[in-house]
Amino acid sequence: MPQLPTVAIIGAGSSGIAAAKALHERDIPFDCFEASDRIGGNWVFDNNNGMSAAYRDLHINTSRERMAFSDFPMPASCPDFPHHTEIAAYFEAYVERFGFRERIRFETAIARADLRDDTGWQLTDEHGVMRDYDMLLVSNGHHWDARWPEPAFEGSDAFEGLQLHAHDYRDNAFLEGKDVVVLGMGNSAMDLAVESSYVARTTQLAARRGAWIVPKYLFGRPSDTFTPSRHVPVAIGAKAFETLLRIYTGPPERYGLQKPDHPISGSHPTISGRILDCIAHGTITPRPNIERLGSDWVQFTDGTRVHADVVIYCTGYRISFPFFEDGFLAAPGNHIELFLRIFPARHPSLAFVGLLQPIGAIMPLAEAQGRLLADYLRGHYRLPSRARMLAGVRREDAAVRKRYVASQRHTIQVDFDRYLHDLERELRRGAQRARRAGFASALPARVAGVAGAGGAAGAGGERPPVAAP
Ligand SMILES: Cc1cc2nc3c(=O)[nH]c(=O)nc-3n(C[C@H](O)[C@H](O)[C@H](O)COP(=O)(O)OP(=O)(O)OC[C@H]3O[C@@H](n4cnc5c(N)ncnc54)[C@H](O)[C@@H]3O)c2cc1C
Ligand SMILES: NC(=O)c1ccc[n+]([C@@H]2O[C@H](COP(=O)([O-])OP(=O)(O)OC[C@H]3O[C@@H](n4cnc5c(N)ncnc54)[C@H](OP(=O)(O)O)[C@@H]3O)[C@@H](O)[C@H]2O)c1
């Protein structure tokens, strides 16, 4: 049996643990590095990694049925849309159940990840300890690096009230009696405008374009379970869903919201069971985009001006990899070219897990990516040629650009069922290529420093700190 490649995983959020479980089950030697003192990433409220966007009253907006890993259902006691504490507990239970907690190194943020051509990866952690691996899996999350409006609105530096990004919002206590402006039409804007409306004097919901608002339930079922078969063309499925929505809630304009300038399939779903009620109650007022700010006011693009104490920017996130050397690999404007949304064609010893934005939940997709990566590392899945990978990337990119509103929030979109299907098909194709290649791993396994799965020293050869990172 040839030596298996050694693997480092960055991050023990839901994506990192999905990959870790797949590797653990296949006895592939790995270490998973986690900045926090616990698993769960975004779902740990007040996470000591400072990266979680969870607020006190956050509930998932993809139903538990969609979100659960395929072989580990959420407890029957959980509601359809559990609270963040239940989601974090579920991820903890997953790691316990499959028994790989000892493979996770907590409070060990990776400060640098350097690709050495001849020896694979050299990782340097926050304590200055260096370790070497053959393969790097990145699952550092893509909802922690706050994206503020660029360029900033005129007068935002003169505004004397409080401006914050949704990432820093924890609960609504500080909004009591205030005049609040919330900007955006994504899911953060929906939740935060609703939370504000319960305690604020006024809440304005400003947006640069309209959105289709999908309630959490349709006809008594979680709305994300209404997905057309992947055999139905996207445009037809979308038209049917749009019609259903129009019958159920009426058009967004009926509530004073902007008319969406795109079909429902052209944007990431905006899901809220409460926003339309709040607008109907007059506790949230829809507005067009912010034009400029003054010392204590906000003016919108239709010329109306309101008094404001607080502005909350729910303007999304940047995809960032702070541990890579400048110029190695980045995602400018959130664009990143990955084959299957996993592999950069130029670097076969690097892969990403969970770096996608599904219509549906991320977790089962990260789980499927983990399975494919385990096959890859064992030599049972072989990548196509670089030219074929690049052609696949270009096709996928063109399809996303054609279908979605041009926005930094839509660069890594996938359809849940289609993506799972495409991954399965590619796994079969890659298995044929692997058979032809005699099941040899594409990665050279280093001989030195490999402790093997379960080895106390970890999978990567460890060297003590030599200098501050
Ligand atoms: C408010 C909010 C609500 C959401 N609701 C849903 C939902 O209902 N359904 C859904 O499917 N998705 C939802 N999402 C999307 C969210 O991205 C996923 O739910 C999920 O958190 C993705 O998991 P992840 O592991 O990829 O990333 P994260 O949960 O962000 O985890 C990343 C992990 O990597 C660690 N890490 C990062 N950098 C380093 C480093 N350098 N070294 C070591 N460790 C590192 C972090 O500490 C963290 O633990 C929501 C996002 C937000 C912001
Ligand atoms: N309850 C939940 O489960 C929950 C809650 C919150 C968030 N989430 C998830 O977290 C992720 C991030 O959501 P998000 O809402 O924070 O971000 P998002 O989906 O990226 O939405 C950002 C919003 O801000 C707008 N915007 C961006 N820049 C702007 C600018 N300069 N001026 C005016 N408007 C601007 C965007 O408009 P354009 O469309 O025009 O770009 C969009 O409406 C998503 O996956 C979401 O589903 C889930």
Image (tube, grey):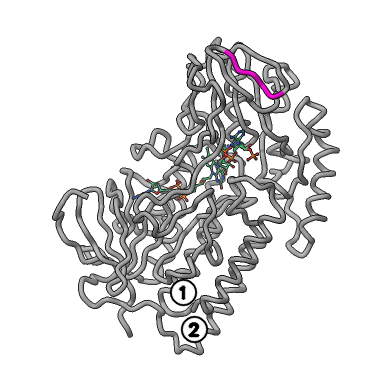
Residue 435 lies, in percent from the top left, at 50, 87
- Number of callouts: 2
Dominant SS in magenta: strand
Disc 1 crowd rating (10 Å Cα; few below 14, some 14-19, many 20+) is many
Q: Is residue 212 magenta?
A: no
For the residue labelled by badge 1, is the local secondary structure a helix, a strand or a loop? helix
The residue type indicated by label 1 comes to Asp
The residue type indicated by label 2 comes to Ala
Read off the residue under disc 1.
Answer: 375
What are the residue bounds of the magenta stretch? 297-301
Give the mark, 2 or 1, whose residue is nearer the N terminus. 1
Q: Does the magenta stretch include residue 299?
A: yes
Residue 340 lies, in percent from the top left, at 56, 65
Residue pictured at 51% horizontal, 60% vertical: 367
Q: Quadrant of residue 280?
A: top right
Q: Nearer the viewer, mark 2 or mark 1?
A: 2
The answer to whether 132 is drawn above or below residue 290 in the figure is below
Q: Of residues 122 and 376, which is closer to you in this image?
A: 122
Residue 425 lies, in percent from the top left, at 62, 73
- C-alpha span from label 2 to label 1: 10 Å
Q: Which mark is residue 434?
A: 2
Residue 167 lies, in percent from the top left, at 48, 34
Disc 2 C-beta below 8 A from ligand 1 = no
Residue pictured at 50% horizontal, 38% vertical: 147
Instruction: Using residue 42 as the reference point, say whether residue 266 is left or right of it.
Output: right
